Amino acid sequence: TTTASPMALHIQTPVVLSPEISRELARPVYLKLDSLQPSGSFKIRGIGHLAQKALAAGATRFVSSSGGNAGLATAFTGRALGVPTTVVVPESTPPLTRQRIAALGAEVRVHGAAWDDADKLARTLCEDPGMCYVPPFDHPDVWAGNSSIVDELVAQLPEKPAAIVLSVGGGGLLCGVLEGLHRVGWADVPIVAMETNGAHSFHAAAAADALVTLPAITSIAKTLGAKTVCKAALEWTRRHVVHPHVVEDAVALRALLRLLDEHRILVEPACGAALAGVFDHATWTSVSAQIPAGPVAVVVCGGSGVSLSLLADWQAQLLK
């Protein structure tokens, strides 16, 4: 069974074995290619699920605050369901991403330096009746929709994984995958939670066992840029084995370049953080010491905040 609604807006994405890294690590490494979702990232799972429930309850306009991918997912959802949509983005959102959101028919408003600022305006707009606030990550309906990844992994993987590696921004993917693991009887599968330095609000919270607000997002992985992770993500660490890891931007960038070379798939640095969990030797050395033997599944969460010109800029800046 899947948590998806009858007319789910997301698709079942492929799982592929990554042959070279599997050989290097001497264990199967599977990539769950959610970069192939119609909105460009896993976000369509949770946001599509929440929006359909909201529409059934009488919503007449969707309002999102997003550094990019949640905004795209909300705009895609609004167009698919015929509901007008407003997306409030911070100034840090690349022009390319703003254009992509607008191309889906949504009204784009730019407000504030970081996501937290844009979010405040979005919530204010939603004080009017019929306006539905679509949170990018912090809502049970978003987690329920994101948990559909696990239902697919159960059907697609040849065996239960020894660990699942994923990126953490605000915590919506993490909470969804954990919910799914517990629903399908995989509660003993540890999570390797990857972030970049400068967007490491989950790592900081897990270390302090309390929510920590970063002073600013300084990583190039802007879509990991929630200065505070959602409370539910921290609470999960008290009842499930989660291993947080932080990598430098250059490490995430090398990982996404390796994915591009080996699989001809381009993702953004936020997703590169998850890939670094297996592609970066130093990181893998510490990860592998924490998890049991057996296959590893990496959630390739995707993301729209990347282009060949951005890639060239980052390479010049970080890989001198």
Image (cartoon, rainbow, N blue to C red):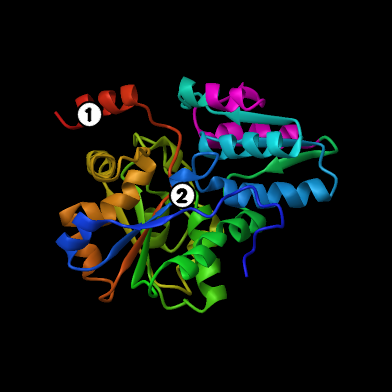
- Name the side, left or right, on which 115 lies relative to 17: right
- Name the side, left or right, on which 63 lies relative to 196: right
- The answer to which quarter of the image holds residue 232 is bottom right
**Segment tinted magenta in the rendering:** 99-127
Badge 2 or badge 1: first in the primary sequence: 2
Q: Residue 247, how many percent across, how many down?
A: 26, 48
- Quadrant that contains the N terminus: bottom right
- Residue 237's label in the rendered image is none
Kindly identify the residue that appears in the image at 58 percent across and 44 percent down. 136
Q: Is residue 72 above or below residue 142?
A: above
- The answer to which quarter of the image holds residue 135 is top right
Tell me if label 2 and label 1 are in contact, CB under 8 Å. Answer: no
Q: Any magenta on residue 235?
A: no
- Name the side, left or right, on which 81 lies relative to 35: right
Numbered disc 2: secondary structure: helix
From the image, tell me which residue sits under label 2.
34
Q: Residue 78, how many percent across, how many down?
A: 70, 36
Kindly identify the residue that appears in the image at 58 percent across and 46 percent down. 44
Q: Any magenta on residue 124?
A: yes
Kindly identify the residue that appears in the image at 38 percent across and 42 percent down. 270
Q: CA distance from mark 2 to mark 1?
A: 24 Å
Q: Is residue 30 above or below residue 223?
A: below
From the image, tell me which residue sits under label 1.
315
Numbered disc 1: secondary structure: helix
Q: Nearer the viewer, mark 2 or mark 1?
A: 2
Residue 283 visible somewhere in the drawing: no
Crowding at dot 2, Cα within 10 Å, few <14 / some 14-19 / many 20+, comes out as many
